[in-house]
Amino acid sequence: MSELAGASAGRLAQAIGAGEASAREVVEAHLRRIDAVDGAVNALVQVDGERALAAADAADAALARGEPAGPLHGVPFTVKDNISADGIVMAIGDPARAQTIGGPDATVVARMKAAGAILLGKTNCPEYGGGIETDNAVYGRTSNPYDLERTPAGSSGGEAAAIAALMSPCGLGTDSGASVRLPAHFCGLAALKPTAGRIPITGVLDDEGPFGSLSDPRTQIGPVAHTAADVALLLRTVAGPDGADGGLAPVPLGDPAAVELRGLRLTVQAENGLAPATPETAAAVEAAAAALVAAGAVRSDEAHPGGGHELTIEVWSSYGDGLDSAGLWRLLRRWDAFRARMLAFGERHDLILTPVFGGPARRHGEMNPPGEIDPTSWTTPHSLTGWPAATVRAGTSPEGLPIGVQVIAAPWRDDLALAAAARIEAELGPFPGPRGL
């Protein structure tokens, strides 16, 4: 293979298994790519090169013995810095943690390794893993590979930038409001915020310590990759109860390849009254809708119940000291009511198609201009519901920047969201990657 850095995770696994490339060659190609471009992008905050090469040699030896570890044998990956990895510094953007070693491996990291994947390192995020721009006092600012004057967004911006810049074929971020979906949209990638309770969050940390499912039911670990098929591959690898996260449910994971799109009820929403979509964003949504209709989906344009973003802003405000216990109780009641309204809406629709954001990647420092309501209103409602929401590229802005769309499905139908994303990808792609890096 002539272009190891840039191949999909699935293709790399196939090549290594067939002897077209060794795991060491694949890891070396990605380490060279990191050396070549990360000085400009600043996506990787810790590179564990020596251990990655040692793991690659062990993977090649195992394959020579006829003992591949699993479906990701020899494939490199990266993870957001708020996901623990044994033996690697885990600062999470806090100067007080600049020398803190993470460990043990988060469940998802351990499962990736057990499937044969090789950890290259950790990626940048805002302080403690929450925020709309990827910047912090320890590692500084991450730039978008499509335009270094623009942000990859947050909070999994380092992860998305690393993959878009071909420094990593795939990886894992976290998402509580937009934090996997928005960076994937800004960087032209596929991603999934899974159904709440699908992937263990054991080993995710914030400023209060380890996360659990009751800490914030919106927070999920999400796979990020070049293709929807790779996202599905990572989901199969990391999903399922781990005996530590009490919020996990043993619900079988469906296969996106087995999903029949014909006859599915699709509703399309290109305006929400909060974050106006650019003409190119609206056109990308329409193109994605046309791809699904061509596959047999039946379209309507009924908007889903409103109020989810405003409720999310109340949830954010509850993190401080300004809300007493009675106020929090009433907030949770309103959250329950919103979820009930959405479930009733879902009885009439199998898929919801929307923008991810009102436009393409913004310039550094311009994500929250004065007077603008928080711009993540397309994604936050589907974190409140806990429903699966996939992101996939569907267009390009006049500046040459990626435009993604969001495909939401009913709870536990991650396979349906990813099947729709794969269809959109197949009909509308491939799209050009970053130039000049």
Image (spheres, helix red, strand yellow):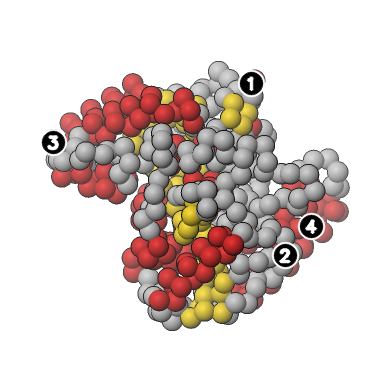
Give me the C-alpha separation between circle 1 and circle 3: 45 Å
Q: Which circle's residue, 3 or 2, is located before the other in the chain?
A: 3
Reading the image, the residue beneath label 4 is 331
Tags 4 and 3 touching, CB below 8 Å: no
Circle 1 — which element?
helix
Circle 3 residues within 10 Å: few <14, some 14–19, many ≥20: few
Amino acid type of the residue that numbered disc 2 sits on in the rendered structure: Gly
Reading the image, the residue beneath label 3 is 65
Identify the residue at image location x=64%, y=21%: 95
Q: Locate residue 271, reporting x and y percent.
A: 65, 66
Amino acid type of the residue that numbered disc 1 sits on in the rendered structure: Pro
Circle 3 — which element?
loop
| Residue nearest the viewer, comparing 18 with 323 | 18
Tags 1 and 2 touching, CB below 8 Å: no
Q: Is residue 59 visible?
A: no
Q: Which circle's residue, 4 or 2, is located before the other in the chain?
A: 2
Q: Which circle's residue, 4 or 1, is located before the other in the chain?
A: 1
Q: Locate residue 408, reporting x and y percent.
A: 54, 64
